[in-house]
Image: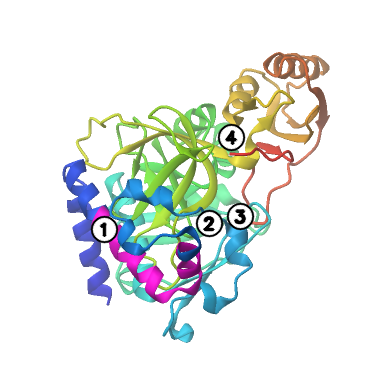
Amino acid sequence: MYFSALLDLYRLRKQQWLETEKLEEIQREKLVAIINHAYQNVKYYRRLFDSAGIRPEDIKTVDDLSKIPVTTKTDIQQLRPNDIIAKHIDLAKCINIRTSGSTGIPLDILLTRREKEFFDMVWARSWMENGLGFTGKKVYIWSVPNYNPRKYWFQHLGIMRREYICFYDESIDPLEALEKANPNIIDGVPSILKLLALEVKKRGSTNMQPKAVFSTSEVLEQDTRELISSAFKAKVFDYYGSEEFGCIAWECSHREGYHLNIDSVVVEFIWNGVKVTPGERGEIICTGLHSYIMPFIRYKIGDIGISSDKKCPCGRGLPLMKNLEGRAEDFIKLHSGKIVAPLVFSTIMRDIRGIKQYMIVQEKLDKLLVHIVPAKDFDSTITNRIQHEIGNILEYKVNVEVQTISELPRDPSGKLRAVISKMPINI
């Protein structure tokens, strides 16, 4: 079984250099197979297809997916296990993974060991393309104490080693622990990597010389990327993935966008129920091509991104997503129906000195609460500037209140959301 995982990695690394058209044909064949399997073996999808008046043979291409209704996390949570799990499965032999619940809605996902290994190899492909060697060490800067997942047999032999350091473990100095580990690759969420980078700047230097820093799970703002890169003197690569689908997209060294792993997942960009044109914003809808125990077909993952038809100069056939804008819950909505992306606020806040961290919460359509963790050079004029700059963007139709606090609250997974809206947008 372990040999199969390494063979998957070999094939995936070779496969990425195929022409896009060939990769799309591989994707299409996998899509037809998973659709047929889901209809024949999963009660929920048989009911869903029948209610929509479609048969598996109606889905021959990615474009045909639009015939299938979208499924949400709430839809799956309301099902009994035998409605969403394929029949004739020994659940005792499955791996249970729980999503982070960053939206307050965690979900239990079941995978076979073989499926989990394939997901891991898709991640490994993107890591190795950005500097993680077979004998390299990757250290995760984590928010959860005593986290120590199962190791593969080859990691015990010194191949693709990994360690975990909890940033909030009060018994250690996380920067000293990181220097002691001396990793080739540092991995973490942007908000924690930013705090670590600020500590490096405060102390003046670090003895580490990592090849790269990997960022994931939060939107990576440009000023945060530059700070992390400057502190660790290494390139920063951003990744996009989920527990449901594994690694969905990743940056290569050209950083012209995010390569979509279309050989393991189908990614659609939808707005108002219609596929968007390249360069437009769309909600991300995913279909997993390797989850046979618990399929995810046209699943609303809750994120919004910008599609692209640009070709990456690296030569890989994996197409690009231009940008990831954040979760649907992170967009600010106005009375007029206009929505404002969270990255707009990062552009405003990064130009205002005296702010260590911030969180913007939309309480009502006409009220915005801005939480500020002040830096040493914070003064009273900054509050007025924040209100003016944000008010200008929102056309002064929203009351902007600023509060200073000592520490920002994180969600249960340890992620930090810079913008949160309690006003849902309809897509």
Of marks 4 and 2, the one in the foreground:
2
Circle 4: element type? helix
Q: Are marks 4 and 2 in contact (CB under 8 Å)?
A: no
Of marks 2 and 1, the one in the foreground:
2
**First to last magenta residue range:** 28-49
- The image shows residue 146, relative to residue 66, as above or below, that is below
Residue 231 place in picture, x, y as percent: 49, 33
Of marks 4 and 3, the one in the foreground:
3
Q: Are marks 4 and 3 in contact (CB under 8 Å)?
A: no
Residue occupying image coordinates x 65% and y 25%: 338
Q: Are marks 4 and 1 in contact (CB under 8 Å)?
A: no
* Residue bearing mark 1: 134
Circle 2: element type? loop
Q: Earlier in the sequence, mark 4 or mark 3?
A: 3
How far is the residue under mark 2 from the one under mark 3? 30 Å
How far is the residue under mark 1 from the one under mark 3? 26 Å
Q: Quadrant of the N terminus?
A: bottom left
* Residue bearing mark 3: 143
- The image shows residue 323, relative to residue 25, as above or below, that is above
Q: Earlier in the sequence, mark 2 or mark 3?
A: 2
The three-letter amino acid code for the residue at tag 2 is: Thr
Q: Earlier in the sequence, mark 4 or mark 1?
A: 1
How far is the residue under mark 4 from the one under mark 2? 41 Å
Residue 318 place in picture, x, y as percent: 27, 43
The three-letter amino acid code for the residue at tag 3 is: Ser
Considering the whole magenta stretch, tell me its main secondary structure: helix
* Residue bearing mark 4: 198
- The image shows residue 75, relative to residue 81, as above or below, that is above
Circle 3: element type? loop
The three-letter amino acid code for the residue at tag 1 is: Phe
* Residue bearing mark 2: 71
Residue occupying image coordinates x 79% and y 20%: 383
